[in-house]
């Protein structure tokens, strides 16, 4: 009888082509490509006289460089990268979703909604937030340019077997706490590099209550904890999400797939290298105060910490630098921090459930004077769904800008970068220095917190607006 295995080990073992002392050669089921990290990889295989090994298992999406206010790409560098991707895909026969295509959007939103990502698969992309796809029970991780080249050429990748970590979310889930708040609480608990070298399985009764889109938000920020990937074992929520999607199995193949997915879970008695428990019962919405996702505090009663309150010299130094960049003073209540820009979107929180949550807060209210809010759906399909539901009218009536799909203000690589000093409440995944512009100070928040902040003009939760003017 074989030893009990985690779901992580099961997916890994199923894809080993060749085992080695230091690493294994893994077969890759799906390779996602975008315009930023792929040009050098395509150049590399062509220099060697090679072709893409499995163009049918490769999908290219324009997302990082495209503008969200127009179909016209005005930035010269962005235009060059997009044009290069189009030429490479045409030359190698790769399906390509261009800016303006009805299926285009952020690659980590598009691939799941097309049904391309399924339980038990291996998925890679030249983007660290490929971990998003782990929500569907896939082993999904970001890779570097040389790895992109290797997968294009061979459909395989050499990797060292990771350590495993169980993250148990226990307790009752408070009604105003979102999946984004859960993962931010985890990162605040273990630190921005606390899961280095691990692949995480998110487990526990709380996870089982969360929708597929919420699980994607959690898995998306796995890398912000230092991990390579994170996943959730498939269940009925997974099956319901995939049923009827364009690339999902049908008929007898669907029945066979579901039977296999139901076996894809951690065995009783399987051991993880590490286990972390997060009790969600007393959680409130979280918001970052510093310049990495681990520098976060509860919004309810949280304050900007004193660097001297940290025990480690390195943490003290990091806090001092963060506060200097963010322009904050120790002891400042998180609720008292003013905001002048709000960004709702990204591969973390640009899905239809995220837009619904924000619209529910904004409905009948107005964005505060002096605050700019932009709403960027994660894909053109999300945009179309939102417009069918009238969410776009809620956003525009409140004074927010309604945009096309793309990565947008998540990173300073397109027209939505901030050009001057700005303090941003952002539903994206990273609050690094200059991430959203040379002078941007970023506070990571959930979609409902972003909407409440836009109305209040300072960091706020929906509960803070109760009884206020609508």
Image (cartoon, helix red, strand yellow):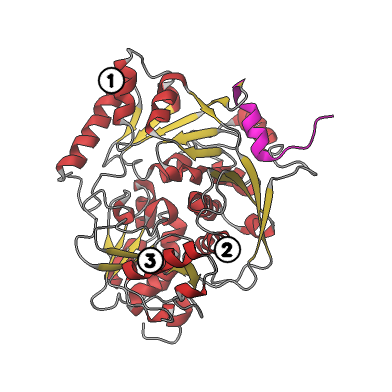
- The structure residue drawn at horizontal position 39% and vertical position 62%, both measured from the top left corner, is 291
Q: Is residue 21 above or below residue 319?
A: above
Q: Residue 213's x, y, as percent?
A: 51, 53
Disc 1 designates what residue? 91
Q: Quadrant of residue 376?
A: bottom left
For residue 71, which quarter of the picture?
top left
Provide the residue designation for mark 2. Answer: 189
Q: Secondary structure at mark 1?
A: helix
Indicate the position of residue 335 as horizontal and vertical percent values.
42, 80
Q: Secondary structure at mark 3?
A: helix
Looking at the image, which residue is at 39% across and 29% down? Answer: 146
Residue 263: where, in percent of width, then height? Answer: 72, 37
Image quadrant occupied by the C terminus: bottom left
Magenta stretch, residue numbers = 1-18
Q: Position of residue 64 (x, y in %)?
A: 30, 45
Q: Nearer the viewer, residue 170 or 70?
A: 170
Name the residue beneath numbered marker 3.
322
How many callouts does the rendering have? 3
**Few, some or many C-alpha atoms within 10 Å of disc 1 (few <14, some 14-19, many ≥20)?**
few
- Nearer the observer: mark 3 or 1; the answer is 3
- Cα separation, mark 3 vs mark 1, equals 46 Å
Q: Residue at x 78, y 37 (%)?
A: 4
Few, some or many C-alpha atoms within 10 Å of disc 3 (few <14, some 14-19, many ≥20)?
many
Left or right: 163 as drawn, with respect to 311: right
């Amino acid at each position: 009888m074989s030893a009990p295995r985690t779901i992580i080990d099961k997916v890994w073992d199923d894809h080993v082509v060749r085992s080695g002392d230091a690493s294994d050669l893994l077969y890759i089921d799906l390779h996602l490509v975008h315009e930023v990290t792929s040009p050098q990889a395509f150049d590399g295989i062509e220099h060697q006289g090679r072709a893409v090994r499995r163009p049918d298992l490769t999908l290219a999406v324009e997302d990082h460089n495209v503008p969200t206010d127009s179909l016209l790409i005005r930035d010269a560098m962005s235009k060059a990268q997009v044009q290069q991707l189009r030429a490479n895909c045409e030359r190698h026969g790769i399906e390509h979703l261009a800016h303006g295509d009805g299926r285009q959007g952020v690659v980590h939103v598009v691939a799941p909604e097309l049904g391309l990502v399924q339980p038990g698969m291996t998925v890679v992309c030249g983007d660290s937030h490929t971990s998003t796809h782990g929500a569907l029970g896939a082993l999904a991780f970001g890779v570097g340019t040389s790895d992109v080249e290797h997968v294009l050429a061979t459909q395989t990748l050499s990797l060292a077997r990771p350590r495993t970590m169980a993250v148990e979310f226990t307790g009752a889930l408070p009604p105003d706490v979102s999946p984004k708040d859960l993962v931010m609480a985890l990162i605040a608990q273990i630190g921005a590099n606390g899961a280095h070298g691990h692949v995480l399985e998110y487990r526990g009764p709380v996870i089982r209550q969360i929708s597929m889109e919420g699980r994607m938000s959690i898995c998306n920020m796995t890398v912000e904890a230092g991990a390579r990937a994170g996943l959730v074992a498939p269940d009925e929520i997974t099956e319901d999400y995939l049923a009827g999607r364009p690339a999902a199995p049908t008929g007898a193949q669907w029945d066979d797939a579901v039977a296999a997915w139901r076996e894809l879970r951690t065995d009783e008695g399987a051991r993880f290298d590490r286990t972390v428990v997060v009790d969600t019962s007393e959680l409130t919405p979280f918001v970052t105060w510093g310049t990495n996702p681990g520098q976060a505090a509860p919004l309810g009663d949280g304050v900007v910490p004193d660097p001297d309150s940290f025990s480690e010299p390195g943490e003290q130094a990091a806090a001092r630098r963060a506060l200097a960049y963010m322009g904050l003073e120790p002891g400042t209540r998180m609720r008292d921090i003013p905001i002048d820009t709000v960004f709702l979107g990204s591969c973390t929180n640009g899905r239809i459930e995220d837009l619904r949550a924000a619209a529910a807060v904004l409905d009948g209210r107005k964005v505060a004077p002096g605050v700019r809010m932009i709403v960027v759906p994660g894909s053109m399909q999300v945009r179309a769904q939102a417009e069918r539901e009238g969410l776009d009218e809620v956003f525009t009536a409140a004074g927010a800008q309604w945009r096309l799909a793309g990565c947008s203000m998540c990173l300073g690589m397109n027209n939505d970068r901030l050009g001057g000093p700005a303090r941003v409440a952002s539903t994206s995944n990273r609050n690094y220095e200059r991430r959203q512009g040379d002078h941007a100070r970023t506070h990571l928040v959930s979609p409902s917190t972003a909407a409440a902040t836009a109305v209040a003009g300072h960091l706020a939760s929906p509960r803070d607006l109760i009884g206020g003017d609508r």
